[in-house]
Image (cartoon, helix red, strand yellow):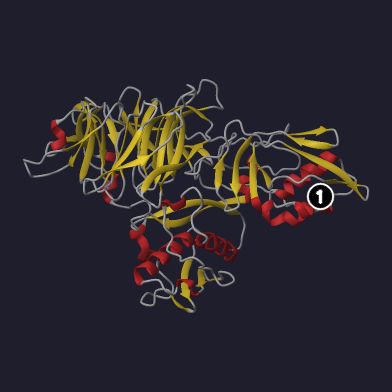
Amino acid sequence: MKRRLLVVLLAAVALLAGCAAVPTKGTIRSGERQGRAQDLGGVGVEAKPPRANVSEMAIVSGFLEAMSDSQAFDVARQYMTPEAAAKWQPEAQTVVYDQSPESLTRVGDGVQLSALKIATIGERGEWIPAAATDRADFLFKLKKIDGQFRVDSVPPGAYLGSNQVDLKLAPRDLYFFNPSLKILVPDPVYLPQNLSPGQGATQLIQELLKGPTSRLGNGVVSLAPPGTEVQVSVPVDFGVATVALNDAASALRDPDRRMLAAQIVWTLNQLNLRAKITVGGAPLLPDDPDVLPFANFNQFDPQVSAGSQTKLYGLQHQKVVRIAGLDGATEIAAQPLNSSPLWAHKAQSFAVSLRGEAGAIVTLAGNEVLYGPLDTTDKDADAVPIKVDGKTLQPSFDNQDNLWILDRATTPHPRLRVRDHDGRLTSVAVDFKGDTPLDLRMAPDGVRVLLVMKPKSGGQNYVQTGTIQTTGSGKQMVLGQLRQLRLALNNITDAAWNKQGIVVIGASNQTTNSVRQAWLVNTDGSSLQLLPGSTPDFRPQYVASNPNKDTLPVIEDDTGKIHWLSRDLIWVSPDSIGGGPAAITPTYPG
């Protein structure tokens, strides 16, 4: 066994315009914002009112700096004419643009902003990636008021330079339930940085009670009845946030009260706050402690913290196996799953249920998917066949043991179906606009979908997310809200869910002749960074991962050998597994 300690290479490029703040640390940004990468801090500049007798360029630069801070909109209005200030609605949206020294130029009677648009942050704080060709161009017309230049044209919301996002905004999750009410689903939003604990708690709970953003839509459920609000604010005292709900939630049944409490507790936990929840002055959960322990709601964990999720499986010589000995626990070995009815068949891809009890393969012939138990003492047990047509992607399981199958992948009309635990097949409407799906990975919640796509135009592969929703009075399932993650990557070959967001295999656009590496990206497509432990001396091709916090990312290289990232950030690359060749196609439950 070879152990390779690899140096992590992180780079950050700060592009400056006018008097913009200069971050000293941060995640990689280049025209896109990817991965829920942790905020590493930086140096900001407080917005200041306009100085007297300065140039048009200085006024616009100061205006952009002031409007980048949601706490300084009153300062930003001082840079505008009274008419423009009255019309301006900065809360409507925030336009994130690719900031550079050349972004601003003097044009006629104004100053022109010319920049690529990276994303729009909507009124709810939702990050919506822009198309690659979208622009954030705007002409700031100026007019003299009492001898001083002022901005006289109203921009569409606030503008925020790409190097200011981590300094001004904080990524947070709102939590809602999947349709089965078994697991929480995170709904990422951006809220202002540097709020007090009480302000942060108040904004989070107010947004939670509004319901899900458009990204999740009717694919999730909120247990807060319509009209549920917090009374005035959410005060915080000694780390405890008191959430006083109005009477709208008083009619909830006990199970629904517990699930509403789970939404609130999980949402506030991001601020390291414990929760005390009342309805009309009485405790929401009268039989629980006043301050609700977070551990009381662990069963709704969106990462599904089951030990079975950390077990690695795979295909070796087109046969299903389990890999024992990851992270040096025992001798590394590929154990044949010869007690499973799937063992009798050769497979081109393999999926395992999150509890490790069942599996599904696409047969080598490619004409059917076989579903069956992974371990059984019933010698007469047979695999259940599901007929498929054309190219069939690797199936995917969610936490409800639903099996998701996408076939006809290379045709103009790919077909997505879901097999439930009782064996019923349901069609899910999809429209990829002529692009070809290469990989489909379901999140454990069964709501969020991750796809690698090949464009019909023949350009670079891309990654997109979607949401399983319903139409037609809830009778038709549909894969909607498809959003391409705007990543500064090319040569993308695979992507998978991870505890920190999404792992993507691709090469950087920023370096000439760069090789594929493993990257981390937020689920909403913001903030890109190398996976710790990169850069390997092998060429990654595919990745096996899932959201469990204890799962070790496993990479298959372009020679078919596997490598996994141990807990001490050392890549483990066995020359053989169980005495045979190391070539294997890995898969984790999910």
The reply to whether residue 327 is in sight is no
Name the foreground residue: 46 vs 489.
Answer: 489
Q: Position of residue 332 (x, y in %)?
A: 23, 36
Q: Is residue 477 above or below residue 262?
A: above
Residue at 75% across / 57% down in the picture?
74
| Quadrant containing the N terminus in the rendered view | top left
Image quadrant containing the C terminus: top left
At numbered mark 1, what does the secondary structure look like: helix, strand or loop?
Answer: loop
Q: Residues within 10 Å of mark 1 (few under 14, many from 20)?
A: many
In the rendered image, residue 196, in percent from the top left (x then y), is placed at 61, 63
Furthest toward the right, the residue is 147
Q: How many marks?
A: 1
- Residue 108 in percent (x, y) is at 85, 33
Using the rendered image of the protein, determine whether residue 501 is visible from the camera's viewpoint. yes
Tell me where residue 370 appears, x and y as whole percent. Answer: 20, 36
Q: Which residue is mark 1?
A: 80
Going by the picture, which residue comes out furthest to the front?
A: 472
Q: Amino acid at mark 1?
A: Met
Relative horizontal placement of residue 10, taking residue 86 as reference (left or right): left
Q: Residue at x 81, y 45 (%)?
A: 151
In this rendering, is residue 191 above or below 543?
Answer: below
Q: Quadrant of residue 333?
A: top left
**As rendered, which of 186 and 66 lies closer to the eye?**
186
Q: Residue at x 21, y 45 (%)?
A: 423
- Say above or below: 242 vs 419: below
Between residue 357 and residue 219, name the one nearer to us: 219
Pick out the residue farthest to the left. Answer: 379
